[in-house]
Image (tube, rainbow, N blue to C red):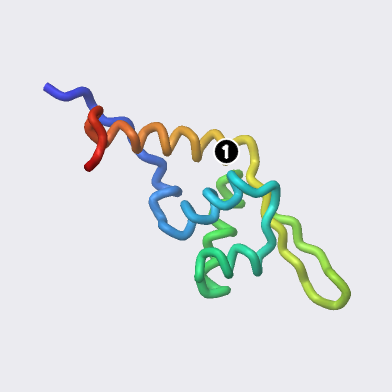
Amino acid sequence: MSPQLPPLDPLLLSELRLSIMAILMQEEEADFLYLKEKTSATGGNLSVQIDKLSTAGYIEVEKGFVGKRTRTVCKITETGSQAFKDHFEALKMYFPAEGIE
């Protein structure tokens, strides 16, 4: 009998939310336009997903101005970083020990 597989983080099962988190794991911070460009997401969808990650405490969102333009900057939190690492480790358990060919 196989051991029970660990649960995956439902918040990180969304491709876009996972992409945002992966980018923020590599970058100290990323603004909205950078995330939009890297993920090829629409502005509306990206905004909704950022809000979900922020509500969960996975990222911090700072809104400000550069000149007369608004600027939204996202940073991963310690909670978000740990959730991403846990999700990644749990995901590895879904694959055979000898790897994928």
| Residue at x 60% of width, y 46% of height | 26
Percent across and percent down for residue 16 are: 46, 60
Closer to the camera in the image, 78 or 33: 33
Identify which residue, 87 or 96, lies in the foreground: 96
Q: For this view, does 6 lie left or right of residue 82? A: left
Tell me the residue at 41%/41% (across/down): 9
Q: Amino acid at mark 1?
A: Ser
Q: Is residue 92 left or right of residue 18?
A: left
If the image is split into quadrants, where does the N terminus sit? Answer: top left
Residue lying furthest front in this view? 101
- Label 1: few (<14), some (14–19) or many (≥20) C-alpha neighbours in 10 Å: some
**Residue at mark 1:** 81
Q: Residue furthest bottom?
A: 68
Instruction: Give x and y (percent) for residue 38.
Output: 55, 64
Q: Is residue 21 left or right of residue 5?
A: right
Q: Identify the residue at image location x=49%, y=35%.
A: 85
Q: Is residue 5 above or below residue 19?
A: above
Query: Helix or strand or loop: what does disc 1 sit on?
Result: helix
In the rendered image of this protein, does residue 94 appear above or below residue 16? Answer: above
Please report the residue visible at 26 percent of the width from the left and 34 percent of the height from the top.
99
Percent x, y of residue 73: 71, 58
Q: Position of residue 60 (x, y in %)?
A: 68, 49
